Image: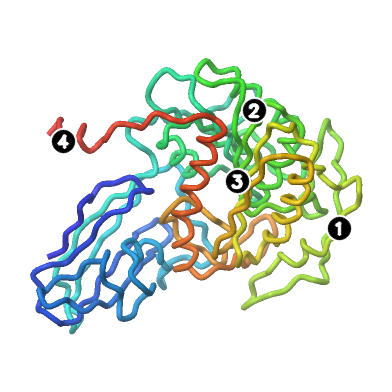
Amino acid sequence: MLHVDKPDSMMTEPICMTATSLVPDKTYEILLKLNHSIGTLYGRGHFKADSRGVIDLAKTAPLRGTYSGVRPMGLFESLTPSDDYRFGSYCKCTPPEPFHFVLELYDDVGKLVHSLPLLKRWMHPAVVRREIEEDGICGTLFLPPGEGPFPTILDMSGTGGGINEHKGATLSSEGFCVLSLAFFQYKSLIEDMNELDMDYFKKAIDWLISQPFTRNEIGIQGVSFGGLLVNMLAVRHPEIIAVCSINGSHCLSDVAKIKEHGKFLPYVGTAVNMLQYINGAMCFSKAVQYMDVSEEADIKIETAPKRTAFRFVGSLDDLSTPTVFCSRLAEKKLKESGHYVEVDFAPGGHLMEPPYYPGLPVVYSKFAGTMQAYGGEPSQHGASQPRVWANTVSFFKRFLGDTKPLPDYRQELRSHL
């Protein structure tokens, strides 16, 4: 009854889903479930079978459900936490184990008719994952097959601490060498982010470009506070020639401040009078937008080497960072200084992730000690992620060099059966 062309696929791969041998013109529900360690997420739609008894998700819009319109991957794009999902939890993907889904078909009285297991992989089986703890730096290295040298990217997250590997694994599955870098609350690293020193990142960059499988030029990607850090690092390190900043701020603040050579870098006071709350979740964006940025606290992004290219991803519904404001501010400075800069605005919330990662409008911030509103409607957010991700991959290939496609692992698996 249910048919999927690729029951085992990479996370970024679209798949074709159909239901056949149905009663013509009857209504059915198709439910997609992701069973994660912190709870269940689901996408669902009620569909009318055509005169042949077929529902093709590439051609049929749901009558109602978690998304609207004809969207072949709408069930994945609209994943929504269910009642058993721990509210405010981040959907961790470290280590980047495959996501196990179940696709279910129900008739018009709610009886289960058929179900299929589906597998979505963050990491291509040919990619090598290696945990790194050398010279005081901690992270996870992802290496595509071959000897290299590979186009190389340093990837980092924000104030959540620890390490997030899914973006690194997904980029490496595109043929990049990637170091997913932790910078606090991980292994032997510092516990307090405000004790972070920019010298740590210099060590990480030096280590990465010294490897035999990399070149002396790298790209860098960061989200949230990491989106600010990558811009600050681009000013300081000419080895960085391509920067992707995802929903990052424009300056350091008294909430998130760091050091350089042992001394705090200039920062500004947060406009706490502009803090807002929605259903008990803190909205931080206006408190950032209305900070009074002094000359010394300006990161002076325009002083980065002229050959450094910048890409800004800005979520239109971000309630954590005023990303439209920050992106436009940086874009203006970089255009005036003659840099290449592109801005990619998209409907969605703060965590603009690889395709089919669940949209999370509210996440508990251990750093702030409260629930934090990230914004975004899950269905719209999910629809934005495949396009934004494809543009990011194209950006890095343009400025770091093209990558070699990885082999079809499904063919390899079949050959061993």
Q: Residue furthest bottom?
A: 109
Instruction: State which tag comes first along the sequence, 4 or 3.
Output: 3
| Residue 283 falls in image quadrant | bottom right
The location of residue 46, given as percent across then percent down, is 27, 78
Task: Please tell me whether residue 217 is drawn above or below residue 368 in the rendered image.
Answer: above
Q: Quadrant of the N terminus?
A: bottom left
Label 2 sits on what residue type? Ala
Under mark 4, the amino acid is Arg
Q: Determine whether 228 is above or below 304 in the image.
A: below
| Labelled disc at residue 157 | 3
For the residues carrying marks 1 and 4, which lies nearer the camera in this image? 4
Q: As displayed, is residue 185 above or below residue 34?
A: above
**Residue visible at 24% across and 63% down?**
103
> Residue 67 appears at what percent x and percent y?
39, 72
> Of label 1 and label 4, which has the lower sequence position?
1
Instruction: Kindly identify the residue that appears in the image at 22 percent across and 51 percent down.
Output: 7
Q: CA distance from mark 2 to mark 4?
A: 39 Å
Q: In what element is the residue under mark 3? A: loop
Q: Work out whether residue 206 or residue 281 is closer to the camera in this orientation and state it.
A: 206
Would you call the spot at circle 4 few (<14 residues within 10 Å), some (14-19), or many (20 or more)?
few
Q: 10 Å neighbourhood of mark 1: few (<14), some, or many (≥20)?
A: some
Do we see residue 97 in this rendering? yes
Is 47 on the left-hand or right-hand side of 338?
left
Residue at mark 4: 414
Q: If you read the primary sequence from the N terminus, does the residue marked by circle 2 or circle 3 appear first?
A: 3
Question: Residue 269 — which label?
Answer: 1
Three-letter amino acid code at disc 3? Ser
Residue 188 image point, x, y percent: 63, 33
* Residue at the spot of label 2: 204
Q: Amino acid at mark 1?
A: Gly
